[in-house]
Amino acid sequence: MWGVDERSGLLFSYIDIERRVPATHPLRLIRELVNGALTALDRKFEKLYSAKGRPSIAPERLIRVSLLQLLYSIRSERQLMERLDFDLLFRRFVGLGIDDAVWDHSVFSKNRDRLLAAEITQDFLGALLAEPKVKRLLSHEHFSVDGTLLEAWASMKSFRPEDGSGKPPTGGRNGERDFKKEARSNETHESTTDLDARLYRKGQSQESKLCYMGRVLMANRNGLAVLGKVTRASGTAERDAALDLVDRRRARRRLTSARTKCTMLLTSCKLSER
């Protein structure tokens, strides 16, 4: 029989949100691991927040929402809040009920940035790697360093000569600027809005952008991130960051022969350019 396309019009729903999410969904296991790591950070959360003032968004929920944004590649906080408003899977992972209100995207951004400024994400990664279910997946023999360019929140219009000789943009909120016949480099120019951003490109045919370099130390057995570091963009930043990540990992555990060879190779490449 052909079904009828009509709205049921029911006022109440008696199905719990737990029954809406399949028992085998990966986010169930991820949430269990995340909650274990967040429990280990309770004392650090207490030091960050004062007993006075208006209550803010719970730090545990801020971290869970940020993880969803990374896992599902949601490009903006506005879209993230919209998705959280109607997606029951997201609501369960974060810890919101069906009737709970979703935060304004600007309020979420301010609270999250305040939490990230306290470097709590590094502590969270360490607590997550210490979880027994995660720890047994880590490899202590083979690893690799991977990285990418992180585009800075700075406009190319802000990249001006350090001596102040460059022409400023035209009037208006987003004025234009003429770059013709102007040789720009990191030695003579800098961004007026982000002093640490550097002009860099991936290859000869690629566009130059103001950016940073992000590096991650990966355990090869299961492709899990162990350590991370963000540096200024330069021709030697990748090798410098790789050596630093290796040294930090070696301080925690004895370095195997494979890691020693990697360190020697990176060191020889670094010295050959001097």
Image (cartoon, helix red, strand yellow):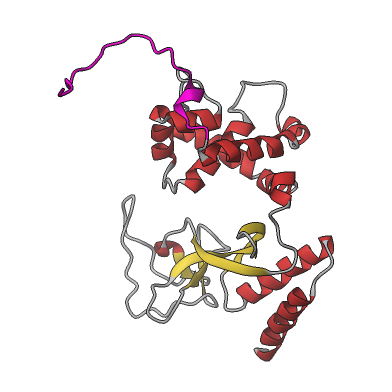
Q: In this view, which residue lies farthest toward the top?
A: 11
Q: Position of residue 121 (x, y in %)?
A: 66, 46
Q: Please, is residue 18 above or below residue 261 in the view?
A: above
Q: Is residue 145 left or right of residue 48?
A: left
Residue at the spot 47% in from the left edge and 30% down from the top edge: 21
For the C terminus, give its image quadrant.
bottom right
Instruction: Out of 92 and 177, give the one closest to the viewer.
Output: 92
Residue at the spot 16% in from the left edge and 20% down from the top edge: 4
Q: Is residue 208 left or right of residue 143?
A: left
Q: Position of residue 233 (x, y in %)?
A: 56, 70
Q: Main secondary structure of the magenta part?
A: loop
- Where on the picture, by quarter, is residue 229? bottom right
Q: Does the stretch in magenta take in 6?
A: yes
Can the viewer see residue 127?
Answer: no
Q: Position of residue 23 (x, y in %)?
A: 52, 32
Instruction: Out of 45 and 152, give the one closest to the viewer.
Output: 45
For the N terminus, give its image quadrant.
top left
Residue at the spot 57% in from the left edge and 78% down from the top edge: 235
Q: Which residues are magenta?
A: 1-23
Residue at the spot 45% in from the left edge and 34% down from the top edge: 105
